[in-house]
Image (cartoon, coloured by chain):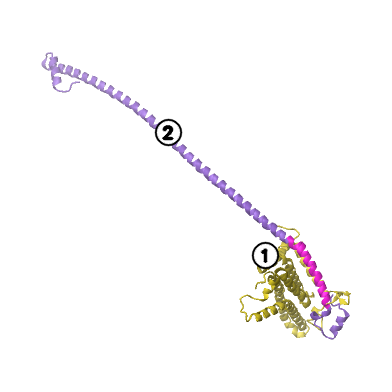
Amino acid sequence: MASGTAINPIEQFELSRWVPIHVFGKDFSFTNASFYMLLSVALISLLMIVGSRHRALVPGRLQGIAEMAHDFVADMLESTTGKEGRRFFPFVFCLFMFILFANVISLVPYTFSVTAQIIITVVMSVTVFFLVIIFGIARNGAHFFKLFVPPGVPIYILPLVVAIEVISFFSRPVSHSVRLFANMLAGHITLQVFGAFVLLLLGGGVWAAIAPLPFVMTLAMLALELLVAFLQAYVFAMLTCMYLNDALHPVH
Amino acid sequence: MAAETKTTSEVHHEGGGHDMFPPFDATHYPSQILWFVIAFAILYALMSRIALPRVGEIKQMRSDKIASELDQAQKLQGEADAAGAAYEKTLADAKARAQTLAQEMHAKLAAETAGKRHELEADLNTRLAAAEAQIRDMKAAAMSNVGAIAREAAAQIIQHLTGRPADVNAIARAQSESGSTA
C-alpha cells in the first residue's frame, strides 16, 4: 500500500498473479484475489464448522456466533420470502457470509478487497438474476410474467408501466452489483487517501504537528467502513431475498 | 508480498501511469470468475452439507429439549398441586375429627361430673334430713325434760314459800295454762 513516495489509492485494487495459469490463451492465474476469496471461505468454514462441532446445548462463544449468523440469515429470508424460501437458505447464507467476510477482511491493512472487484459482484448479482428468472419460470410458468403487469393499472398506461417494470427488472443486476462494488471501492480509496495524508504530513517537517488530524479521521473512517462492510453484505443478501421472493410469489 | 510478485506487465503499467483501472481490467476476468466459482462452490458445499444442517440440528435439539423440560415441569407442577390438595384435605379431616373427639370427651366428662354431683347431693340431703330428725328428737326430749325440771323447781319454790308440799297437779295445770309444754 502506502510505500514511500508515490501513494496511489488505486494500487490496492491491482491483482498480482501468484501462480500464473494460462489455459486456452486465457488467464486463470491464482491471484491475490483468489487467495482472499479462499481465505474468506476458510474463515467462514472455521466459524461454522469448527464452531458447531460440539453441538452444545448451551453454546460457547464460537457456536454462539455461528448460530447468530444462521438465525440472522434465516430470519431475513423467512421474513421476505416466507416458508417457501427455505430452499434458498444455503445460497443466501453463503452470499451473505462471503460478502461480509470479504468486506471485513479487506479492512485489515495490506489485505485485498475482493468485493471491490466489479467482476465478482457482477457474477454474484447475475447468478441471483438468472436464478430468479429460471426458478420463477420453472415454478410459475407464464404466471411469472405477471411480475411485469401490476394489477389495477388502467389499460391506457399499462404499456408504459410494463415497460418501466421490465426496465427496472433488467437493471436489477446492475444496481445490485454496482452498489456493493462502489461502496467498497469508495471506502477503500477514502481510507487510503486519509492514510496517505498522514504519511505526507509526517514527512513534511513542521506539518507533522497536524498529522494526528487525518489519523483520527482515518480511524473514524475505519469504524464507518466496518459498518458499511456489514451493511452492504446485509443489503446484498436482503435484495437477493426480495428478488427470490418475486420468483416464488410473482404477484406484484 | 503482493508487491514483489507483480508481473512484469503490471510493473510496466505502473510505470506509465494507469491506462486501465484495475477492477475494469478484463484480462483478469477469467481468473477472477474461475476462482470465485471455485471458492463459492467449496463454501456452498461445506455450508449446505455440513455446517447449516448441523446448526439447524443443534437448534432443533435445543427447542426439543426446552419443550420436553417444560412438559416435565408442567407435569411435576400438576403433581405438586395434587399433593398439596391431598395434604389440605387430610389436614381438614384431621381437624374435624379432633374437634368431634374433643366435643365427645367434653360431653362425657360433663355427664360424669353431673352424675357424681347428683349422687353427692342426694347423699348429703339424706344425711341432712337424718340430722334434722335427730335434732328434732333431741329438742323434744330436752323440752320434756325442761317441763319436769320446771315443775320440780316450782314445787320446791312453793314448798319453800308456803312451808308445805305443793300440789303437783296444780303446778302441771298452771304450766299447761301458761303455754308452752314440751
Kindly identify which chain the residue marked by label 1 belongs to: A
The quarter in which the C terminus of chain A is drawn is: bottom right
The secondary structure type at the circle numbered 1 is: helix
Q: Tell me the colour chain B is drawn in.
A: purple
On what subunit does the disc labeled 2 rest?
Answer: B
Please state the horizontal and vertical placement of residue B87, each as a whole percent of the image.
54, 44
The region drawn magenta spans B28-54
Q: Which mark is residue B79?
A: none
Q: Which residue is at 68% across, 57% downward?
A: B62
Q: Residue at the location (49% across, 41% down)?
A: B95
- Disc 1 and disc 2 in contact, CB within 8 angstroms: no
Q: Which residue is mark 1?
A: A83
**Label 1 to label 2: alpha-carbon separation:** 82 Å
Q: Label 1: few (<14), some or many (≥20) within 10 Å?
A: few
Tell me residue B20's x, y (percent): 81, 83
Viewer-closest of A252 and A149: A149
Vertical arrangement, residue B67 with respect to residue A179, above or below: above
Chain A hue?
Answer: yellow
Amino acid type for the residue under numbered disc 1:
Lys
Residue denoted by label 2? B109
- Looking at the image, is A98 positioned above or below residue B90? below
Quarter-wise, where is residue A123 in the image?
bottom right
| Coordinates of residue B157 in the picture (x, y in percent) | 15, 18
- Quarter holding the N terminus of chain A? bottom right
> Residue B50 sits in which quadrant?
bottom right
- Considering depth in this image, is A88 or B125 the residue closer to the camera? A88
